[in-house]
Amino acid sequence: MAVMEEAALDAAKALSAALRMLGQREHSQRELVTKLRRKFPSLADEQLDTVVEELLENNWLSDTRYAESLIRSRANRGYGPQYIARELSVKGIAAETADEQMEAQALDWLALAEDLVQRRHPGAQDSPELWQRAARYLQRRGFPSDVIARALGDCPYSR
């Protein structure tokens, strides 16, 4: 009897910890499960599944909401769609959920890339070296090549 009470207490503590984590920021399901496993190593898989199911049923945990939040956050920090898609994949978000949320955000990637070029590489149109540096910068930030080409225009030495 004491073992069952202890197991129920561990599950209740895990639920409480999960709610505290979700109160601070959104988490993906995979991310939250990893944190709970690390914090409660004695918790059985069935109990952890029960905790996650309760969080999902009450809409306290949502991969869709997490994806929306992450996309908005990363785009505001100047990251492109490829970088964001990779990060969502690493965080355990399904590709279809990521694609749906990327479309739902309706971000203007070209305007974002142009803004980054103006702020970080204002003379990119004047010199081939600066143009290449700006192109590499946008590439590292996860912008596709067609957006980079339109944001930077023709390379100065190819005119």
Image (tube, rainbow, N blue to C red):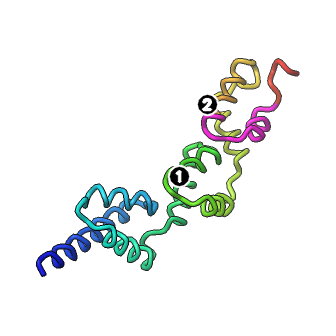
In this picture, is 51 found above or below 142? below
Magenta range is 139-153
Q: On residue 102, which mark appears?
A: none
In this picture, is 39 found above or below 141? below
Query: Which residue occupies 19% across, 74% down?
Result: 9
Marks 1, 2: nearer the viewer: 1
Secondary structure found at label 1: helix
Q: Amino acid at mark 2?
A: Arg
Q: On residue 73, which mark appears?
A: 1
Q: On residue 120, which mark appears?
A: 2
Which quadrant of the structure image shows residue 11? Answer: bottom left
| Residue 157 image point, x, y percent | 82, 18
| Residue 42 image point, x, y percent | 23, 62
Who is closer to the viewer here, 115 or 1? Answer: 1
| Residue 18 image point, x, y percent | 33, 66
| Residue 88 image point, x, y percent | 54, 53
Side (left or right) of 67 relative to 42: right
Give the main secondary structure of the magenta stretch: helix
Side (left or right) of 154 relative to 27: right
Which quadrant of the structure image shows residue 50? Answer: bottom left
Determine if the magenta segment contains residue 142.
yes
Secondary structure found at label 2: helix
Determine if the magenta segment contains residue 22.
no
Mark 1 closeness class: few <14, some 14–19, many ≥20 residues within 10 Å: few
Q: Amino acid at mark 1?
A: Ser
Q: Spatial distance from mark 1 to mark 2, Cα to Cα? A: 19 Å
Quadrant of the image containing the N terminus: bottom left
In this picture, is 143 found above or below 65? above
